Amino acid sequence: MSVIEAKGLNLTFQTNDGPVHALKDVNLTIEKGDFVSFIGPSGCGKTTFLRCVAGLEHPTGGTLSVNGMTPDEARKARAYGYVFQAAGLYPWRTIGRNIALPLEIMGYSKSEQAERVKRVLDLVELTGFEKKFPWQLSGGMQQRASIARALAFDADILLMDEPFGALDEIVRDRLNEEVLKLWNNTGKTIGFVTHSIPEAVYLSTKIVVMSPRPGRITDVIESTLPRERPLDIRDSAEFIAIAHRVRDGLRAGHMDE
């Protein structure tokens, strides 16, 4: 079942220095339950595409549907949760109250808020930290709280814009494992932006390789890795072969400039 469908998608920004072609002729289908990573050089349109899906940017050509709706309709229907590069937690609110914020805005009862906060804290392994403030948590824990907030209203789609880019490798590995476990436990459809080839290969069922501006898709790689993936799978011949194909796609995109 198609969850996200882009056909001939274009997005051009008008600037004082002339038009900037952020996306060009993007065609992509994301199925229910897919974990799709977007990888490419800075400025290739990875985040722009995710923001189009979220209805935060508006394409200037082509079509884009989310759960059979326009992105704006999907946003109003709360079809997705969005995790930004920075955790974006309010320092004056506890972790529990940060996670509950979208539920408050949506008008959920206090009891329903408490139940959902408890459930997502358990999903991201932060049970017991609901009364802490963001400054009392490590960077990795803050990002887990940000993921919990995006999960709180139980949307079927989770959009993640390079959420672990600022973290050290050890913490990043740990969170990669947790995101995979969360995906396995919830069955959500995930769109994930990254600059890391190992991260993209480790996490994804599908890897979308994008070229420098104007952002185009140069390759869509269907992963042959099993759904259960220990970290040491990264040493396997199969993993290395997929990583080489991603690297070749990135190189080809540069050569096409």
Image (cartoon, grey):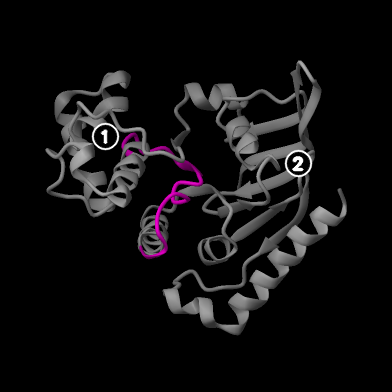
Give above or below for 37 relative to 18. Answer: below
- Residue at 56%, 22% (x, y): give it: 73
Q: Amino acid at mark 2?
A: Gly
Q: Nearer the viewer, mark 2 or mark 1?
A: 2
Q: Find the magenta span and give its range.
A: 152-170
Q: Is residue 85 above or below residue 33?
A: above
**Sooner in the amino-acid sequence: mark 2 or mark 1:** 1
Instruction: Determine which quarter of the picture holds residue 88.
Output: top left
Q: Residue at x 12, y 48 (%)?
A: 128
Judged left or right of residue 102, residue 93 is left
Q: Main secondary structure of the magenta part?
A: loop
Residue projecting furthest to the bottom: 237
Residue at 57% x, 60% y: name it. 200
Task: Please determine whether, in this image, residue 74 is positioned above or below residue 49.
Answer: above
Q: Is residue 57 above or below residue 169?
A: above
Q: Report if residue 53 is visible in the image.
A: yes
Quick one: which residue is furthest to the top in this view? 16
Residue 171 is tagged as none
In front here: 33 or 122? 122
Q: Disc 1 designates what residue?
A: 99
The part of the image, by quadrant, that contains residue 229 is bottom left
Q: Residue at x 18, y 43 (%)?
A: 136
Name the residue carrying label 2.
Answer: 215
Q: Amino acid at mark 1?
A: Ile
